[in-house]
Amino acid sequence: MKIYIINSEKDLEKFKDEYGYYVDGNADIKCSLNIGKRLNVVGFIYIEADGSIRAGWSIEAGESIRAGGSIRAGGSIEAGGSIEAGESYGISAGLQILCKTSLTFGLKCFAGVCTWRKISDSEKTITCGEFKGGVVEYGILKETGIEKIEEMTKDEVCKTLGKTIKIKK
């Protein structure tokens, strides 16, 4: 999968679509971003150093989201892998937070801080495979457990990852 280096908000403009930004690959972001709508990345989102990411709507990555600073979204935050914010930072989402593996952050996490309408319990749920640190200040934490891939069949791994795997001979 191709890695796109984003050094400024201007570099992100080539990925603009009608809903915000769509990156068909991995995003290695070397700055803080303040995005009006949503950021959807097929692969991973990696934000270096103290860089933070803020989206007016949602942040979604097919793989992991990792930021040296904070992660904030007006809507949901979703990752096919892990979500990690910096040691001195936290995570805030207007709606739910979902990651299939680990969730780690330094300070506080808020999910379901929606101010524009009434929300259900499912919309303020923080769902992760394994909770590794920080304090859930607002939201409902739900740990699903991380399945050990080495103990799974090829078909079970494909279903869990939502991907097709070809084995070379």
Image (cartoon, helix red, strand yellow):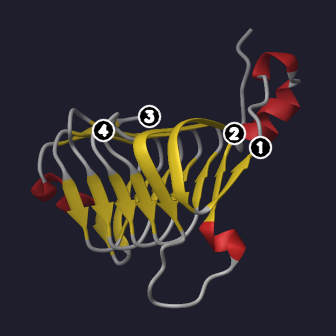
Q: Amino acid at mark 3?
A: Met
Q: Position of residue 87 (x, y in %)?
A: 34, 33
Camera-side residue of 81 and 86:
86
Residue 148, picture quadrant? top right
Distance of mark 2 from mark 4, alpha carbons?
A: 22 Å
Marked residue nearer the N-terminal end (2 or 4): 4
Which corner quadrant holds the C terminus?
A: top right
Q: Please rate how many residues cluster around mark 2, counting C-alpha atoms within 10 Å: few if below 14, some from 14 to 19, many from 20.
A: some
Of badges 2 and 4, nearer the viewer stands 4
75 or 141, nearer to the observer: 141
- Mark 2–mark 3 CB contact (< 8 Å): no
SS class of the residue under badge 4?
Answer: loop
Which is more foreground, mark 3 or mark 4? 4
Q: Say which mark, if any, is on residue 129.
A: 2
Crowding near the residue tagged with mark 4, few <14, some 14–19, many ≥20 C-alpha atoms within 10 Å: some
73 vs 86, nearest the viewer:
86
- Residue at 74% over, 19% down: 167
Q: CA distance from mark 4 to mark 1?
A: 26 Å
Q: Are marks 3 and 4 in contact (CB under 8 Å)?
A: no
Task: Say which amino acid is labelled 1.
Answer: Thr
Dot 1 corresponds to which residue?
144
- Is tag 4's residue or tag 1's residue first in the polypeptide sequence? 4
Question: Disc 4 designates what residue?
Answer: 88
Could you give the CA–CA distance between mark 3 and mark 4, rounded to whole angstroms?
31 Å
Q: Which residue matches tag 3?
A: 1
